[in-house]
Structure formats: C-alpha cells, structure tokens
Amino acid sequence: MERYISTKYTSYSPQWKINRHLAILILLIATLSACKNEISNINNPVIPGFNPDPSVCRVGEDYYLVTSTFEYFPGVPVYHSKDLVNWQMIGHVIHRPGQLDYSNISSTAGIYAPTIRYHRGIYYVITTMVGGLRDSIVEQKGNFIMTAQNPAGPWSDPHWIDNAPGIDPSLFFDEDNRVYYTGNRHEENSKFRAEKDIWIQEIDLDNFELKGPVSVLDSRPYFESNIIGGAAAFEAPHLYKKDGTYYLLIAHGGTGIGHAASIWKSDSPLGPWEMNPGNPILTHRGYEQSGINCTGHADIFKTDDGEWWTVFLGVRSKDKKNNVMGRETFLSKVDWSGEWPVINPDGETGRTAHSIPAPEMWDGEQRSFNFRDDFNDDQLQPDWTFIRNPKTTWWDQSTKAGYMQLKLRPEVIEDYSRPVFMGIRVIEMNCTFTTSLDFTPQKPGECAGMAFLRGHKPHWSLVKEMHENQARASVYYADSLLSGTDLRGSGELGLKITLEDFKLSFFIKEDAGDWQKICETDGHELGFPPAGRFTGSFCGLYATSRGDSNVNNVAGFDWYEMKKTAGSCSVASSP
C-alpha cells in the first residue's frame, strides 16, 4: 500500500506540485488571452469633440494629426500618437496672434481643412483661411503653407500661394523630389453651384509658387450621371503613390448626410484618372440609424509595420442631424493588398462603427479625454481654446497661485469679436462641467462664470452678477435672462453645467452647501445639421463687462473640470 501511494501524484509528491503549477500557468495564459480578445476593440471616435477634417503623417514610429478649427484660436491643433488610438494634443500650427488676423471672421469661417506632411526634416501644413460672411473686411484669405522642424512648434508665418483658388489644399512629395499641390475650384461656367473640380499642379516650395501645367478631375460627368452618387462639392483631395501608381482620394456629397469619399488612379500625378468602380469607398448614406453619420473627408496612411489605416470625419447621431459635439475624428483599418483600398475590410465595407478592431501596436488602454485644470502652471494647457485670436492678454495664471484670473472686457460672445472666453471641446452627449469662481461684481453689467456654446449663437451662460445691489447667480440665453437667484454669501461660488443629451441644467453651490439647480433648458438648437454648421460645442470660462470699457475688475477661477457622465462610452478611465 505504501509503495502504491508513493508512485501516485499525491499532494505530498513533488511531481504533483510541478503539474499543478503548470496547470495554473496554462489557465492563467488562457485567461489573459481571453481578456485580450475581450479588449481587442477600441472606441470610435479616437479624437472626440470638435475635430473635423483630420489629416495624418507618419515619421518613423510617430504619427501626427491635424484638424480644422475655423474661427477658434489657437488654430489647427497638432495631435501625437504612437498607437493610432491615444492621441495627445502637443501644440498648434497657428499659435501666435501675429501669424494670422482673425478680425471679423464669422462663425464657421476661418481655417478650413489642413493637411500635414513631412519631408526631409520639415513638417508642412497647408490650409485655407476663409473670410465667410464678412469677406469685404477680411484682408487675409486664401491658401497658405506653414512649416516647422518640430510638429509641436514653433511654426512659421504663413506662406501665401498665389493663383490657388478653392479650399482644402494638400501636398504630395514624389520620389523624384517634385511636389504637387491639389485643391478644388468652382468653374465659372458651371450650371450647378455645387459643381467643383479637383485641380493638381506642381509647386516650388523654395519660393512657394505654383508652376507647370494644371491637371483637372472634372466633376461634371459624375455630377450629371450620378455614377458615384452625391458628386456635388468635390473637395479634400489627397494624392498618394503605391506600387508605382498614383491615387487621388477626394471627399464629395457635401459634409452632411450625403458625405462620402471616392478614389481614382493614374500612371501620372497629373492624370488622366481612372475611377474605382467600387466608389464610394467610404459613406454612411442610407445607414443613418447606425448612430454614425456624415462620414468622409479621409486621409489614408501606412503604418511603420506596413498596415494601412485611414482617419476621417464623422458625426455621432441617430436622427441624421442632431449632435452636440460636431464632426469628430474616426479611425478605420484599410485593406490595400489589391488594386483599390478597402475601408473596414473586417466589417461592413465602407462604413465604420462605435467599436472597431484595434491596431496591433495598441497596448490595451484608451484615454477618456476627461479634462481638469488646477491652474498650477504658468502656461496654458494646449486644450484651451479662444474665440478668434486675442489682441491683448486678458488671462493670467501666474499672479495668484493656483488660479486663472480673467480680466473683464466689454465684448460678448454673440458679437463677431474677441470675448473673454476660454473653452474646452465637448466630448460626449452626457457631460458635467464644473468650476469654482472667486468674483465680486462691482457694478451692473459685470459678470463672470461659465458659458456653453456652439458658434456665437446659440450660447448659454451661468454667471455671477450684480442686480439691484444684490449679488445674483443668473442663467442667460445670449442676452436673454432665463432664471436667477440671489446669493447669500460672498465666498467662492461653485458653478456646474450638466449636459444630458440635449438637456442643459445649471447649478450653483455656496460655501459647503449642496448643489442648487437654477434652471434647465432644451439645447436642441445646438444640433443643427453639420452642413453649413462646421464647428462643435465648447464649454468654459467667461467674463464680460457687457460693453463697458471703463472696468478693471478680475474674475478668478480655482479649477475647471469636464467629465463624462452616464451614457458615455469609453474603454478606460485614464484622463
């Protein structure tokens, strides 16, 4: 009996212990593998909030991405990533007030559709300044290039390109060191207002001058025949070269529900062009209930390990038009093993989803884009955004430690001016925005607090002000008072705005008390269709004297925070 037992793997046997440990190790590996499979998807958009018209360039293992900013300053944010999933804003292309003059730029005018490219140690961003509704008094407009040796900046002053009509320019660096400019233009004799052609011409980047013959991709045959559907507004051209063949990717159909991207090929960068019979290669037309709409304006790029991917704009909405965030940056894999690129080859081809397979280089975490600033640094965090470029410095976070101090100025948000507003992009339909305000209004008209806006109108503000010699917390829609309540104390005032789908609620907290709701309002006006409404929503700090230029008062903010709330979708909760 004893001999029999000694030959079996009992709990007292060393061999049994080895096998037990081996079994545990195998189980652990299987569990980790299962966990990896469960988290192998990432959330789209990869850059939430107002970030339209994305463009990417790769430099080694680093990826740099830029987006449109229209009337907002600093202009053209530069994002950096090593895994295509987690993008961090590292600076702006337009970061000095003297680079461009935003005077009288109307809402949704300003900087359109930048493209970023890298060549021989230099980063290039090419984009358009659009005057918009007040063209007659906007002196600087047209297409220009800015350069930098470091994508975080500093960037050069603009190099304006003469005889370059249209918007959405791009650059292509060929293997023979020739450089080509692509853009769009409207034909003067066109029968249709939305009929726009794509044009290509060589450019001399030593002198920033166009030269040589012009090639044209004529939109009229597609417009009249409706071969690709929604041929209106050919724009956003990008030129690529793969296996000796040139490819021309464009957006079309307008930037609304009919938005799409299509591609052509040629043996020459100047054409003639052969259309992909599978066009469009990207669109959500007829698929609006997916919750993602208006997909288009894409840029395709190759990773360091040889995979192809694309970034493009899209809108999160289920009813075809209503959204708060505006157009955001989405990511999708591309299969370009054949003649033509195929977007989202492992899913519904040519479409995207809220959850997509992750790049191999991804480490399993995805940032939430929650934001908090305790104002402990001397410099602004790059996420802060102004309405147009300021002429004077009205913000100060160095005089009073741990506070952002804003000087009251006469401008208000609803004007085409430069109000004292600094905002953060709204990243979800369900968010909470909170701050602590140290401010004593000295006379009627002075107010400070928070504002929630999309363009100069509509906008709401939650402010502390003076009313009949009494401090009051008030909620305004533009300059119309919605509600108010008298304040008891004189200490710091907590301010909170919550967004729940399209419902905006406004709260205050005095001293150590509880949050008190002042009012709530319907914010559906934020959800205009994206066509003709190019920007997204911001929420942030606001101060004004409402037209009184004889004011020396200052509003202090101890901190500011934006957090996703119920209904948000995120992989990880890291800020």
Image (cartoon, grey):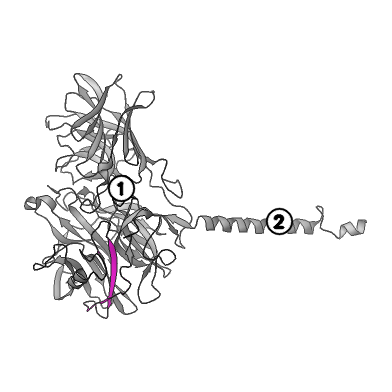
- The image quarter containing residue 290 is bottom left
Q: Position of residue 191 (x, y in %)?
A: 11, 66
- The image quarter containing residue 434 is top left
In the structure shown, which secondary structural element does the residue marked by tag 2 occupy? helix
- Horizontally, residue 547 falls left or right of residue 253, namely left
Q: In this picture, is 471 found above or below 274? A: above
Residue bearing mark 1? 323
Q: In this picture, is 423 found above or below 48? A: above
In the structure shown, which secondary structural element does the residue marked by tag 1 occupy? loop
Magenta-span inclusion, residue 267 = yes
Q: What amino acid is at disc 2?
A: His
Q: What amino acid is at disc 1?
A: Asn
Magenta-span inclusion, residue 404 = no
Q: Nearer the viewer, residue 241 or 192?
A: 192
What main secondary structure does the magenta stretch of the protein show? loop
> Which numbered disc covers residue 21?
2
| Magenta stretch, residue numbers | 252-280
